[in-house]
Amino acid sequence: MRILITGGAGFIGSHLVDRLIADGHYVIAMDNLVTGNLQNIAKHTSNTKFEFIHHNVSNHIHIAGDLDWVVHFASPASPVDYLELPIETLKVNSLGTHNSLGLALRKNAKYFLASTSEVYGDPEVHPQPESYWGNVNPIGPRGVYDEAKRFAEAITMAYHHKHNLDTRIIRIFNCYGPRLRFNDGRVVSNFIHQALTSKPLTIYGEGSQTRSFQYVSDLVEGIVRLMGVKFHEPVNLGNPQERTVVELANMIKELTGSKSEIVFKPLPTDDPKRRLPDITRAKKLLDWTPEKDLVEGLNTTIAWYREHLPQVAAAKK
């Protein structure tokens, strides 16, 4: 198949590029490199089944030739990014989603939307099933991402119902692994970066808030399986094993051998207290459950950081 991936130079997008090329498909990665990195896809540069286009999908998208899939992953995805780029985040998930849907319609291609567990906001239902409508503050600081993704889901479903476009929607719960940016601002990258550079591990609030962590290869497997199933409503992809932030901090300290202290700072506005996916739908529909053990996944991620983090790499020389 010939597949366009928007955000293809990003963390998850680049791993998906790897998988789809390995599966024999022709992949076009499109990215404006605001949060993506060409190093993530550099190994495919000479591959005749790969193409990179530097473009902002908030503007009209033109692709020559046929497409079988339009896979929309373009968006800032961490609080640091979308709080710094609020307008860009709103635009890529509204205009960018509209443009990519229009492209899929013109090409008679299938469409895949990467949504997020943030559509549930600070949830009052645990675990969160796809039927839960969420608890979102539309005008809070996180609303630029939460509401943008909720709109993206709404317009994707509108294209499905109005134009009979063959669509898929996933809601991604916390994902980690190699290529997660050092300054990404998400809890795994924060803790590993801080531990390896002997800085205090920063916990916001008391650290009793929970998250679920899925390794990127598990997520990619779920994406590929959903591409092969005709199902149009959202599907949660995440790890149903709940961990507190304090527990994660201590785990990363132990795995890195860091002597960094743990410090506590005020909890940001609207920060979710619990985040836990109900993956019943993914189990039944895709026969999918995450397989990577957290310790194993963290060790692989830490090893990648040791190799690529400038301060750490320089210290080893």
Image (spheres, rainbow, N blue to C red):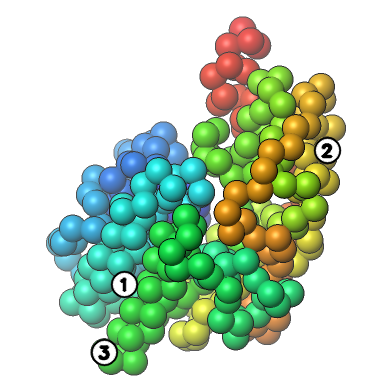
Where does label 3 land, which residue?
163
Residues at marks 1 and 2, CA–CA distance in whole angstroms: 45 Å
Q: Amino acid at mark 2?
A: Asn
Q: Secondary structure at mark 1?
A: loop
- At 62% from the left and 66% from the top, the residue drawn is 122
Q: Residues within 10 Å of mark 1 (few under 14, many from 20)?
A: some
As rendered, which of 51 and 300 lies closer to the eye?
300
Residue 70 figure quarter: bottom left
Judge left or right: residue 42 versus residue 287: left
Q: Earlier in the sequence, mark 3 or mark 2?
A: 3
Q: Secondary structure at mark 2?
A: helix
Residue 105 figure quarter: bottom left
Q: Residues within 10 Å of mark 2 (few under 14, many from 20)?
A: some
Can residue 16 be seen by looking at this rendering? no
- At 38% from the left and 84% from the top, the residue drawn is 157
Comparing labels 1 and 3, the label whose residue is closer to the camera: 3
Where does label 2 land, which residue?
250
Where does label 1 land, which residue?
68
Can residue 161 be seen by looking at this rendering? yes
- Quadrant where the N terminus sits is bottom left
